[in-house]
């Protein structure tokens, strides 16, 4: 049996004057050993506007440096538009690619409709850097279009050279969905120049397949884990996952795993061992936790889970779109850093407000 050892915790992005809060963070591991970290900078969790803050984090040195956000050109060209998450991926040394959402912001409305849970209109944009993130190209729309809103996950590079990212499809403000399948994988077969292809991830109707997170096993299979939300019952369902054995071209129907949490982030470790970071919001012991699986990522040893961040309160409602300001933590991710080490990132309530934090773990 393996175990998870929690190491040092650091705050990576914060605002000392408490003017802003930071969430939706995800780090990209770079060849120089640093991490490029982006987070959404907002005034409150319902803020539909939002900007992107970025830093370079050097865990071996404990050093944090300001960085240029990938969507800088769009923020300058479209000052009245807002931004959702922004994710960076290293395609090769010094060559980075970022995917982010640009919102047609109406500041008189919250980001999500309080009645229908629909969100303000958003387009998915791509930018690129050939100097390790010092400068970024102007933003460009992805080629794949859809009548529902596309909310992107982080870009992954598959063993055959395919580059793609999981998405959730979201309904527009005050409207219903156009299609019943919300989970998809958008990909490029020309090195990330053109994102024009898409694969459906089969799942039951009437659910939001949210926050898809990827990992790749030793056979090159792509596994995507989702948070499933019952759109009619306004409640969380069991978490699900789907597997592609042909580099994102087709996916097996999403199947439930033995986990009933909000956002879950997987990491393939070795053989049949997986690590899962998850958000336990509705229990007597809420927080962000990490657990191990020994059966290929189906069941997880939550009894021996390690608490990465412990919270002292839970939201009043199980609907994540209606209880944003009750949340004190969330959006946890995991990135492998070595043979038996990983970096977990999340946002949480700290001394100076909601900040982006990192925690190193070791699997022994």
Image (spheres, grey):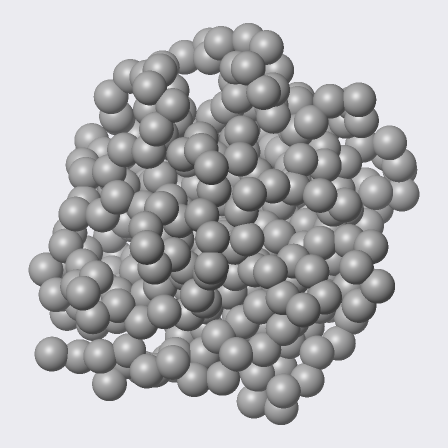
Residue 294, image x, y percentages: 12, 65
Among all residues in the image, which is located at the extreme bottom? 61
Residue drawn at the location 53% of the way across and 35% of the way down = 323
- For the point 62% across and 91% down, the residue is 61
Query: From what the image shows, is residue 246 above or below residue 300?
Result: above
Give above or below for 176 relative to 284: above
Picture quarter with the C terminus: bottom left
Closer to the camera in the image, 25 or 197: 25
Compared to 46, does 94 lie above or below?
below
* Residue 337 in sight here: no
Q: Which residue is drawn at 65% across and 62% down?
A: 355
Q: Which quadrant holds the N terminus?
A: bottom left
Percent of width and height locating residue 260: 26, 44
* Residue 363 in the figure: left or right of residue 73: left
Residue 255 quadrant:
top left
In the picture, measured across the screen, residue 260 lies left or right of residue 298, that is right
**Does residue 141 appear left or right of residue 181 in this picture?**
right
What residue do we see at 26% from left, 68% from top?
A: 305
Q: Is residue 341 visible?
A: yes
Q: In which quarter of the image is residue 241?
A: top left
- The residue nearer to you, when weighing 76 against 230, is 230
Report x, y in % for residue 57.
64, 76
The spot of residue 248 in percent (x, y) is: 33, 41
Nearer to the camera, 17 or 249: 17
């Amino acid at each position: 049996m393996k175990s998870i050892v929690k190491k040092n915790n650091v705050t990576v992005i914060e605002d000392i004057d408490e003017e802003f809060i930071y969430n939706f963070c995800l780090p990209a591991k770079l060849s120089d050993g640093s991490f490029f970290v982006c987070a959404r900078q907002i005034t409150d969790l319902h803020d539909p506007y939002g900007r992107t803050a970025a830093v370079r984090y050097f865990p071996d040195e404990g050093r944090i440096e300001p960085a240029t956000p990938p969507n800088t050109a769009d923020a300058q060209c479209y000052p009245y538009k807002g931004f959702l998450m922004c994710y960076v991926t290293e395609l090769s040394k010094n060559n980075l690619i970022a995917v982010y959402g640009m919102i047609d912001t109406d500041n008189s409305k919250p980001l999500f409709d309080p009645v229908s849970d629909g969100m303000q209109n958003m387009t998915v944009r791509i930018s690129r850097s050939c100097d390790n993130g010092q400068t970024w190209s102007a933003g460009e729309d992805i080629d794949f279009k859809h009548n529902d809103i596309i909310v992107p996950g982080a870009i992954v590079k598959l063993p055959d050279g395919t580059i793609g990212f999981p998405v959730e499809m979201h309904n527009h403000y005050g409207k219903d969905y156009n299609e019943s399948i919300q989970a998809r994988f958008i990909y490029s077969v020309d090195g990330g120049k053109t994102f024009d292809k898409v694969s459906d991830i089969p799942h039951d109707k009437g659910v939001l397949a949210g926050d898809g997170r990827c990992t790749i096993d030793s056979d090159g299979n792509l596994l995507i884990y989702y948070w499933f939300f019952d759109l009619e019952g306004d409640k969380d369902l069991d978490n699900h996952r789907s597997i592609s054995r042909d580099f994102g071209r087709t996916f097996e129907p999403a199947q439930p795993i033995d986990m009933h949490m909000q956002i879950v982030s997987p990491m393939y470790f070795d053989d049949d061992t997986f690590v899962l970071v998850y958000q336990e919001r509705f229990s007597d012991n809420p927080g962000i936790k990490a657990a191990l699986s020994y059966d290929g990522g189906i069941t997880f040893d939550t009894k021996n889970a390690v608490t990465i961040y412990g919270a002292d309160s839970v939201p009043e409602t199980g609907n994540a779109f209606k209880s944003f300001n009750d949340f004190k933590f969330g959006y946890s991710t995991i990135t492998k850093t070595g043979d038996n080490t990983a970096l977990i990132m999340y946002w949480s309530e700290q001394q100076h407000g909601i900040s982006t934090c990192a925690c190193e773990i070791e699997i022994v």
